Amino acid sequence: MKSNTLRKRPTDVPVQKASEQPGKDLREADKQRQHKEFIAAMNEFITKGGTLTDDEFFRVL
């Protein structure tokens, strides 16, 4: 018969430390901000102009 006890994973996984390179955090934040701006601009473009393809499969009714 199988036991119903839970098997816990080891908890010795290293905890993420504060970045040793503060400039790296700023670069990552800037990269994320630029990505969000790009996505917002693309969403606005698609809303105004429709899809980016002429393929019949993607045509809006």
Image (tube, rainbow, N blue to C red):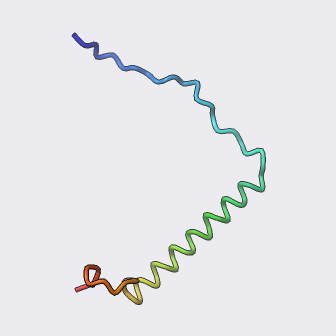
Rendered residue at 54%/24% (across/down): 11
- Tell me which corner region of the image, top left, top right, bottom left or bottom right, holds residue 53: bottom left
Q: Residue furthest bottom?
A: 49
**Image quadrant for the C terminus?**
bottom left
Residue 22: x and y, percent?
Answer: 77, 52
**Image quadrant for the N terminus?**
top left
Q: Is residue 60 above or below residue 36?
A: below
Residue 38 in the figure: left or right of residue 52: right
The one nearer the camera, 35 or 55, is: 55
Residue 21: x and y, percent?
Answer: 78, 49
Q: Is residue 19 above or below residue 44?
A: above
Q: Residue furthest top?
A: 1
Rendered residue at 52%/80% (across/down): 41
Q: Is residue 53 above or below residue 5?
A: below
Residue 19 in the figure: left or right of residue 11: right
Rendered residue at 25%/13% (across/down): 2
Counting every numbered tag in the picture gives 0
Residue 9: x and y, percent?
Answer: 47, 24
Q: Residue furthest front?
A: 55
Residue 60 in the figure: left or right of residue 38: left
Residue 20: x and y, percent?
Answer: 77, 44
Rendered residue at 42%/83% (across/down): 46
